[in-house]
Image (cartoon, rainbow, N blue to C red):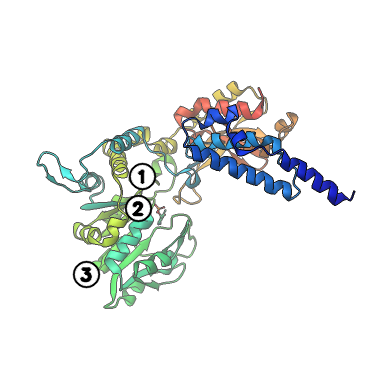
Amino acid sequence: MSDGDVQNDAANSRLRRIPSISTILSDPEVRRRTDGLRTDVATQIAQAVVQRVRSAILAGDGAEQADEIVAHVVAELDALQQPKLREVINGTGVIIHTNLGRSPVSEEAARAMQDAATHYVPLEIELAAGKRGGRMAEVTRLMSLLTGAEATLVVNNNAAAVLLTLSALAAGREVILSRSQAVEIGGGFRVPDVMRQSGARLVEVGTTNRTYARDYEAALTDETAALLTVHWSNFRIIGFTAQPTLAELAELAHRRGLALIEDLGSGALADTAPWGLVHEPTVGESLAEGVDVVCFSGDKLMGGPQAGIISGRADVIRTITAHPLARAVRADKTALAGVAATLRHYLRDDYTETIPIWRMISAQLDELEARCRSWIDQIGFDGATLTTSQSAVGGGSLPGETLESRAIALGEEALQRRGLTIELVAHRLRSGTPPLVPHVENGRLLIDARTVLPGQEAGVVTALSAALNPGS
Ligand SMILES: *Cc1c(COP(=O)(O)O)cnc(C)c1O
């Protein structure tokens, strides 16, 4: 017999061992998992697994054994019931971690969101009067007290806020922007593209490093609708640079009866400077300097749910609200409830205790150190040490700025003594229960205490113990 015949024989015998769909579905382990599932779902999964194994065998790949089909179906049925967006422990030290869902909200915001989601709520009704009321009344009131904004509109995210604002105020006309601010924020948000999408015409002025108020003034025409300024969220320009102040731009815009729009990006409502960071401009400061409309994210430094917040002059916000796109991108009742609950933390000045990202930003080193020591004691691995680390705010705010932090470090050598590698332990941590995302740098695996939530202490110990002592 030729080699080819031998392979065909092997393939045929493997194909013959593939069980029928009904055999798979009547396996006790499979049945235990299909109880309560729509019947065709289990059939679809079994068929897909069989198809996959059959193709693998025909392609000469013996890795997928026909005998393991039931195990694959069981694994897929288990995975189906497991929500993807379940709790993860963030050990990276990056506070507003975009890939991990940016800002976790406060307990109070989460309760408000759940309450709004599971009940009827007076979204557009004034209960006492029994008449129609404004969807934005609550957030408008809160933002006005916190920032002086006359009116506020909440939409899906900041990208939508900027697109809507430009569409409503400047479609078909010109918007003047400094060349240094024709930026890409990431995730497909590029200011020139958003501008084009809104129907406004971008007029770039100045140079990459230096732009003056007179550059904006020289570009004004009868077609000018607004001046736009965009916060450099995730990069810096240093050295020989110049930018006009917001007050100068506001003066120029208002002298010509135009609006000054600011895309503030992160949109801090509190000062970052007391925590050893540079000062991130706040929404209130922008409005005080004369900006007519400020757009910012709800889930960056504000620390709330995903939202885009448009705050500013009442007449301008009215124009924006009346634009047809406003309906397409409006925030739902749960986001509005979460935003309002988050704003109340600033009203009460308890945000450093209640809003997770502010608790992390303001955490003291001795507290972080004590948490690391307690984890080290509990995991009982001699290669785990306390170390100094650098935590970043992230989420496109405060680029290059770090907060000194404390972490558990697992060194390469100590892991090798147990027959482990950094990559293997990192993989086990990420795929464990609960999953823990570590920070890997310079031959060390770090778990930064700053970004571990208070309720996750035990989870860190469980995750590390399991990754370091598999099978125990
Ligand atoms: C983050 C950011 C955006 C996009 O905000 P999303 O809430 O992610 O839509 C837009 N502009 C700036 C300056 C940003 O920093």
Q: Amino acid at mark 2?
A: Phe
The answer to whether marks 2 and 1 mark residues whose Cβ atoms lie closer than 8 Å is: yes
Q: In this figure, which residue is indicated by the disc labeled 1?
A: 302
Of residues 137 and 61, the one drawn nearer to the viewer in this rendering: 61
| Residue depicted at 29% across the width and 78% down the height | 221
Mark 2 vs ligand 1: CB below 8 Å: yes
Q: Dots 2 and 3: beta carbons under 8 Å? A: no
Task: State the image coordinates of residue 253 (x, y, percent, origin top left).
Answer: 26, 68
| Residue occupied by mark 3 | 257
Residues 209 and 397: in front is: 397
Q: SS at mark 1?
A: loop
| Separation of marks 1 and 3 at Cα, in angstroms | 31 Å
**Residue found at the very far left of the displayed protein:** 129
Mark pair 2, 3: CA separation: 24 Å
Left or right, 357 with respect to 337, comes to right
User: Which kind of residue does numbered mark 1 sit on?
Assistant: Met
Q: Residue at x 73, y 33 (%)?
A: 413
Q: CA distance from mark 2 to mark 1?
A: 9 Å
Q: Identify whether 58 is placed above or below 341.
A: below
Callout 1–callout 3 Cβ contact below 8 Å:
no
Precedes in sequence: disc 1 or disc 3 = 3
Mark 2 nearby-residue class (10 Å; few <14, some 14–19, many ≥20): many
Which of pointers 2 and 3 lies earlier in the amino acid sequence? 3
SS for dot 3: loop
Indicate the amino acid at tag 3: Gly
Q: Is residue 240 left or right of residue 256?
A: right
Residue with the mark numbered 2? 296
| Percent of width and height locating residue 330 | 30, 52
Q: Secondary structure under badge 2?
A: strand
* Crowd band around label 3 with a 10 angstrom C-alpha radius: few (<14), some (14–19), many (20+): few
